[in-house]
Image: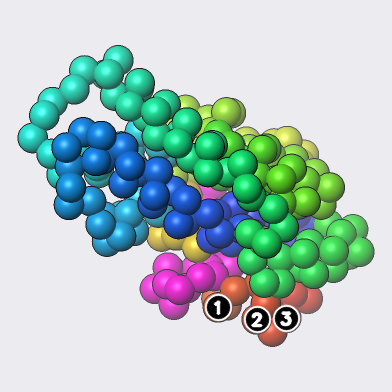
């Protein structure tokens, strides 16, 4: 039986996709890369900051050292955090608050498993933090999805076995990570039908029969 739900953050509970895109595009333009598009940004869905940086750098012709890459990734994050200054409850996706409240009423524990090192800040600024028991994010992990590390750490923090966890994800890499961790999954978002999740829904505002998923 499922005793805990582990949510990915961006695209599942909140939407900061546009901010990420604008921050990466600003960095790309700093580097003289003028053809970074939303299609390129889609390839960054669910992967780590460093993997996302490589997608940007592949658009250019200059090679960078690992130290330089770390500085570039930090510059992008600085741009992103600057944009996060105006983040509030308006960034929370439809159905997220109601879902979290209902799950709490069922005495389930709730975690977040996200590649983003900004996860704690985002949860605080959007008002979601009081509904989350444990967070596993880029501050805890060294391996990015589809490696299961982020969900394994979340389960450990929640004191649950893999079989007691259900992961809610909007990316193929996230669903692969859940499978690798031995966890069932609910795929949501615009690509929910192609993610290969155990269960599917358009989003948390869809008519999800949670009782069936929790068996």
Location of mark 3 (residue): 209
Q: Is residue 130 left or right of residue 49?
A: right
Circles 2 and 1: CB distance less than 8 Å?
A: yes
Q: Is residue 187 magenta?
A: yes
Most foreground residue, 141 or 28: 28
State the image quarter where residue 200 is shown. bottom right
User: Which segment is the magenta one?
Assistant: 178-198
Q: Assess whether residue 136 is covered by the magenta stretch.
A: no
> How far is disc 2 from disc 3 in space, using C-alphas?
9 Å
Give me the residue at 54% from left, 37% from top.
81
Q: Quadrant of the C terminus?
A: bottom right
Badge 2: how crowded within 10 Å, few (<14), some, or many (20+)? few
* Cα distance in 3D space between marks 2 and 1: 6 Å
The residue that mark 2 highlights is 206
Q: Quarter of the image for the N terminus: give it.
A: bottom right
Mark 3, secondary structure of its residue:
loop
Q: Quadrant of residue 114?
A: top right
User: On the rendered structure, is 114 left or right of 134?
Assistant: left
Secondary structure of the residue carrying tag 1 is loop
- Element carrying mark 2: loop
Tell me whether circle 2 and circle 3 mark residues in contact (CB < 8 Å).
no
Left or right: where 40 falls relative to 171: left
Image coordinates for residue 182, horizontal then vertical, percent: 55, 52
Question: Percent position (x, y) of residue 117?
Answer: 55, 34
Determine which residue is flagged by label 1.
202
Q: Is residue 3 above or below residue 60?
A: below
Taking depth in this image into account, of 116 and 174 the one nearest to the observer is: 116
In percent of width and height, residue 133 lies at: 80, 44
Camera sees residue 151: no
Q: Residue at x 21, y 18 (%)?
A: 65
* Drawn side of residue 51 relative to residue 179, left or right: left
């Amino acid at each position: 039986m499922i005793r805990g739900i582990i949510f990915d953050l961006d695209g599942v509970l909140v939407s900061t996709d546009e901010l990420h895109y604008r921050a990466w595009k600003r960095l790309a333009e700093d580097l003289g890369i003028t053809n970074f598009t939303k299609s390129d940004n889609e390839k960054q869905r669910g992967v780590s900051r460093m993997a996302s940086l490589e997608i940007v750098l592949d658009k250019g012709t200059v090679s960078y050292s690992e130290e330089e890459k770390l500085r570039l990734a930090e510059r992008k994050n600085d741009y992103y955090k600057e944009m996060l200054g105006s983040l509030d409850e308006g960034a929370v996706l439809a159905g997220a608050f109601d879902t979290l409240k209902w799950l709490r009423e069922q005495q389930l524990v709730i975690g977040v498993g996200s590649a983003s090192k900004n996860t704690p800040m985002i949860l605080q600024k959007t008002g979601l933090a009081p509904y989350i028991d444990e967070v596993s994010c880029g501050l805890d992990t060294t391996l990015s999805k589809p490696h299961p590390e982020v969900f394994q750490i979340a389960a450990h923090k929640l004191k649950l076995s893999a079989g007691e966890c259900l992961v809610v994800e909007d990316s193929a890499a996230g669903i692969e990570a859940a499978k690798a961790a031995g966890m069932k999954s609910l795929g949501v978002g615009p690509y929910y039908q192609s993610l290969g999740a155990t269960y599917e829904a358009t989003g948390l505002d869809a008519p999800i029969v949670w009782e069936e998923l929790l068996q």
